[in-house]
Image (cartoon, rainbow, N blue to C red):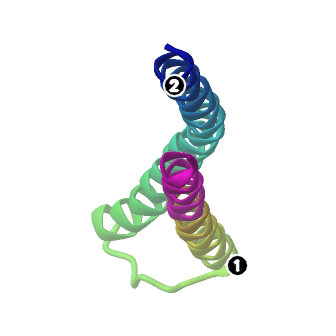
């Protein structure tokens, strides 16, 4: 009987630990995804602004010259893309850490 209760208790403890790992990972992933969405929206707005400047040049039959304004927009777009890539890498790291923690929990006796 003690053996059965010990196994049940061990299973419950593993379940609780796994739920804790999942909860922590979910919170971190939600924060990261929120940052990614914000950066993607910012990048989209910047690209729209850049596109409008290029469109205005075309409509006015002007030569498209990358001036300071366009260059700044391009730099900001690049910054957003780099930040998005960093956050996506962080997202993968969080998932890998959660998977590792869960595998350690399942291996415990």
Q: Secondary structure at mark 2?
A: helix
Q: Which residue is mark 2?
A: 3
Q: Secondary structure at mark 1?
A: helix
Is 18 or 34 nearer to us in this picture? 18
Magenta residues: mostly which secondary structure? Answer: helix
Q: Residue at x 55, y 34 (%)?
A: 18
Q: Position of residue 80 (x, y in %)?
A: 60, 63
Q: Quadrant of residue 14?
A: top right
Is 1 or 16 nearer to us in this picture? 1
Q: Which mark is residue 89?
A: none
**Highlighted magenta segment, given as a residue range:** 92-109
Is 22 or 53 nearer to us in this picture? 22
Report whether 63 appears left or right of 19: left
Neighbor class of circle 1 (other Cα within 10 Å; few <14, some 14-19, many 20+) is few
Tell me, yes or no, whether the highlighted magenta stretch contains residue 107: yes
Is 74 or 22 nearer to us in this picture? 22
* Dot in front, 1 or 2: 2
Q: How many marks?
A: 2
Q: Residue at x 53, y 42 (%)?
A: 33
Neighbor class of circle 2 (other Cα within 10 Å; few <14, some 14-19, many 20+) is few
Residue 49 visible within the image = no
Q: Residue at x 57, y 29 (%)?
A: 10
Q: Position of residue 106 (x, y in %)?
A: 48, 47
Which sits earlier in the primary sequence, circle 1 or circle 2? 2
Q: Position of residue 83 (x, y in %)?
A: 63, 65
Residue 52 visible within the image = yes
Placement of 76 over or under 10, stated as above or below: below
Q: Residue at x 49, y 49 (%)?
A: 40
Q: Which residue is mark 1?
A: 68
Placement of 75 over or under 7, stated as above or below: below
Report whether 30 appears left or right of 62: right
Q: Spatial distance from mark 1 to mark 2, Cα to Cα?
A: 74 Å
């Amino acid at each position: 009987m003690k053996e059965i209760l010990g196994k049940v208790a061990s299973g419950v403890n593993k379940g609780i630990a796994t739920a804790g790992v999942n909860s922590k990972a979910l919170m971190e992933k939600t924060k990261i995804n929120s940052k990614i969405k914000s950066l993607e929206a910012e990048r989209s707005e910047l690209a729209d602004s850049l596109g409008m400047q290029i469109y205005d040049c075309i409509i006015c039959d002007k030569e498209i010259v990358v001036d300071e304004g366009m260059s700044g927009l391009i730099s900001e777009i690049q910054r957003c893309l780099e930040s998005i890539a960093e956050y996506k890498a962080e997202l993968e790291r969080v998932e890998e850490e959660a998977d590792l923690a869960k595998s350690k929990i399942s291996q415990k006796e």
